[in-house]
Image (cartoon, rainbow, N blue to C red):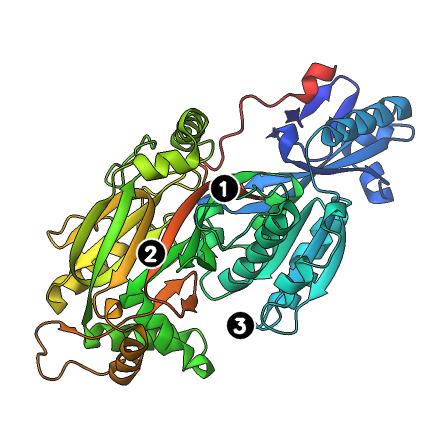
Amino acid sequence: MLRSHKINRSLYSWNAKNCFVPTSEIIAVEETDLNKKQRNSGKWQKMAKPHAFTVYYVKKARNHRWRCSDVTFWCVDEQLCNQWIQALKELLELQTRPKHLLVYINPYGGKRQGKRIYEQKVAPLFSLASISTDVFVTERANHAKDNLFEVNINKYDGVVCVGGDGMFSEVMHGLIGRMQKDSGIDQNNPKAPLVQCNIRIGIIPAGSTDCICYSTVGISDPVTSALHIIIGDSQPLDVSSVHHNNTFLKYTVSLLGYGFYGDVLKDSEKKRWMGPMRYDYSGFKTFLSHHCYEGTIYFQPAKHTQGSPRDKDSCRTGCHICRQSEQQLAEEHKKCGLKHEEDEEEWKVIKGKFLAINAVNMSCACPRSPKGLSPAAHLADGSSDLILVRKCSRFDFLRYLIRHTNQDDQFDFSFVDVYRVKSFQFTSKLLEDNESDVTDIGKKHFGQFCRDHPACCCSIANSTWNCDGETLNSSAIEVRVHCQLMKLFARGIEENCKEAASNQSTVEQLL
């Protein structure tokens, strides 16, 4: 930890303030050429020829916001000044920080500000931290994903995506797919043990909601995210694979929603010309439609986890639940084997009519819903929170939705059930008869208001699965959670964002 007011009798700081900085949060150290005004001011005026260096560091503000600040030290002894510069740089070299990054920019996402945000707010910080970059501006959907299958990924220390949740999903699919391809893993096999990605992903938020960034950092702010990347933070993340009839469909890390959230997405896709406002319009329209869907859910409880969806133990930096759950799961796999464990463990079955079926691997918090869909969901415990909203009145469903914006328990309703699971399957009732016919019926009735029975739900054929903001073609799916399959340049949400890590080495120890 760097103490800035007076480090020793011969080294002074230009900013005469007490400042304690963990060495892990130092961004860069540079030799500084003092200008004439500084040399002729105050008590430094009598110094013969002062030598100086500047330390750039992370300054933590409210609401998990980070900023780059600096403090300048100087002394008359040039050798002492150089010793400090060298010692601090050696400390930074010992840490697992990125030196070369591959950057993908989506210029069309959100408010189309991705390129400007990167060039004006992020690139200067990367340059300050001596991080070299290869920048790739995408021109079409899946451009980044396709490029990741071709590029020499081993020469990079990480991949950065500038955009929204869709851009992150594209990069994630590219990295995971590339890793499985190189390892000879068949992604179409739903029971295949996937190979973990050893390359971290950094997210520079520039989208409409930026849910993944908000849930893993605590704020959607480009500068904060850039600083997490620079200092080399690492946050493991669970990833769920989605299959249909032994065919791989998608990976998901945040929301997999059927019913309400699927209908909202499908309707909003037709109104992209409205911009982000389309989600509000489609949400209101879908709420009035009030459709429910009949089907069967099979799931395996996540018995290895240490927490519960109903507890108040939220996932935070250095989460003990994620750590203990991962260890317990690893022991189970080592003892029994993955396939044996899945075959032997009991499956639970639930049938009914549902307004919404949501599976979340994280809280899915965002500025509009600070607690998210499941406040106690964990980022890396090898489980997903399965939320079932059964058929109810419009008024009760509205009460449920409002709970996502306040501090009340959104699971405290008789028509809402929540389970912590490690895998599940869903089959629509009508889909079991004839999938193609059902799809046609769903298209015919989708978006129509329930005029015949305005006070209750009407069951229609099929909804659409919302998989991290993208629609899935199949309503019958099989989902499996892969514990800590990938890592982000993040540290989770800090309990106290101004609390310094107590286990960091200190600069004073070098004296």
Q: Secondary structure at mark 2?
A: loop
Image point (77%, 23%), residue name: 11
Between 36 and 34, the one nearer to me in the picture: 34
Between 103 and 32, the one nearer to me in the picture: 103
Image quadrant in which the N terminus is located: top right
Label annotation for residue 111: 3
Mark 2 or 1, which is nearer the eye? 1
Image quadrant in which the C terminus is located: top right
Residue occupied by mark 1: 193
Label 3: how many Cα within 10 Å (few below 14, some 14–19, many 20+): few
Where's residue 429, x and y in %? 21, 66
Measure the C-alpha gap from mark 2 to mark 1. 34 Å
Relative side of 269 to 436, left or right: right
Relative side of 504 to 473, left or right: right
- Is there any visible trace of residue 507 in the rendered image? yes
Where's residue 456, x and y in %? 9, 72
Label 2: how many Cα within 10 Å (few below 14, some 14–19, many 20+): some
Image point (27%, 41%), residue name: 309
The numbered mark, 2 or 1, whose residue comes first in the sequence reads 1
Where's residue 341, x and y in %? 36, 34
